[in-house]
Image (cartoon, rainbow, N blue to C red):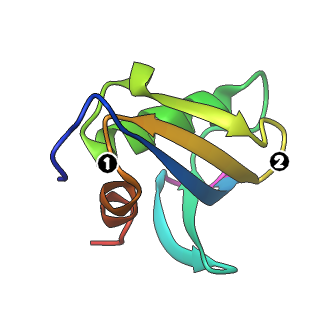
């Protein structure tokens, strides 16, 4: 887990697949980290699940992760407060 710095914000673009069997990192899709979400794409359930998953992976509170672009798209742009871009990418590497 990367060290948190309250003065930086990471910008991370990911590809998500809602309605999967389980929530997990699933490698890359078109060069972007792919996250499979167990939540369905209904009433923002998948977006909330994505925020919770990314926050846990990055070691930041859920309030530090927000969707900047792509609320209704599978390709989403996230802002993660407290991490730089390198730290966010490292957290999204499959382990």
Q: Is residue 43 left or right of residue 62?
A: right
Helix, strand or loop under label 1? helix
Please state, as top left, top right, bottom left or bottom right, where the C terminus lies in the image: bottom left
For the image, the number of numbered tags is 2
Please state which of residues 16 and 80 is positioned toward the viewer in this rendering: 80
Q: Is residue 19 magenta?
A: yes
Q: Is residue 64 magenta?
A: no
Q: Position of residue 80 (x, y in %)?
A: 44, 38
Judge the density around disc 2: few (<14), some (14-19), many (≥20) Cα neighbours within 10 Å: few
Judge the density around disc 1: few (<14), some (14-19), many (≥20) Cα neighbours within 10 Å: some
Q: Position of residue 49 (x, y in %)?
A: 54, 34
Residue with the mark numbered 2? 73
The part of the chain drawn in magenta is 18-22
Q: Tell me which residue sits at (31%, 65%) in the image.
A: 90
Please state which of residues 1 and 51 is positioned toward the viewer in this rendering: 1
Sequence order check: which comes first, mark 1 or mark 2?
1
Main secondary structure along the magenta-highlighted residues: loop
Residue with the mark numbered 1? 57
Please state which of residues 47 and 23 is positioned toward the viewer in this rendering: 47
Q: Position of residue 3 (x, y in %)?
A: 15, 46
Please state which of residues 84 and 25 is positioned toward the viewer in this rendering: 84
Q: Is residue 94 left or right of residue 11?
A: left
Asked if 48 appears above or below 56 in the picture, the reply is above
Q: Tell me which residue sits at (37%, 37%) in the image.
A: 55
Label ID, residue 89 = none
Helix, strand or loop under label 2? loop
């Amino acid at each position: 887990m990367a060290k948190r710095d309250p003065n930086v914000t990471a910008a991370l673009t990911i590809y998500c697949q809602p309605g999967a069997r389980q929530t997990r990192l699933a490698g890359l899709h078109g060069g972007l980290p792919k996250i499979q979400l167990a939540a369905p794409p209904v009433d923002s359930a998948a977006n909330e699940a994505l925020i919770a998953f990314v926050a846990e992976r990055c070691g930041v509170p859920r309030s530090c992760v927000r969707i900047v672009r792509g609320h209704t798209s599978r390709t989403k742009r996230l802002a993660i407060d407290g991490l730089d871009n390198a730290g966010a990418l490292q957290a999204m590497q499959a382990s």
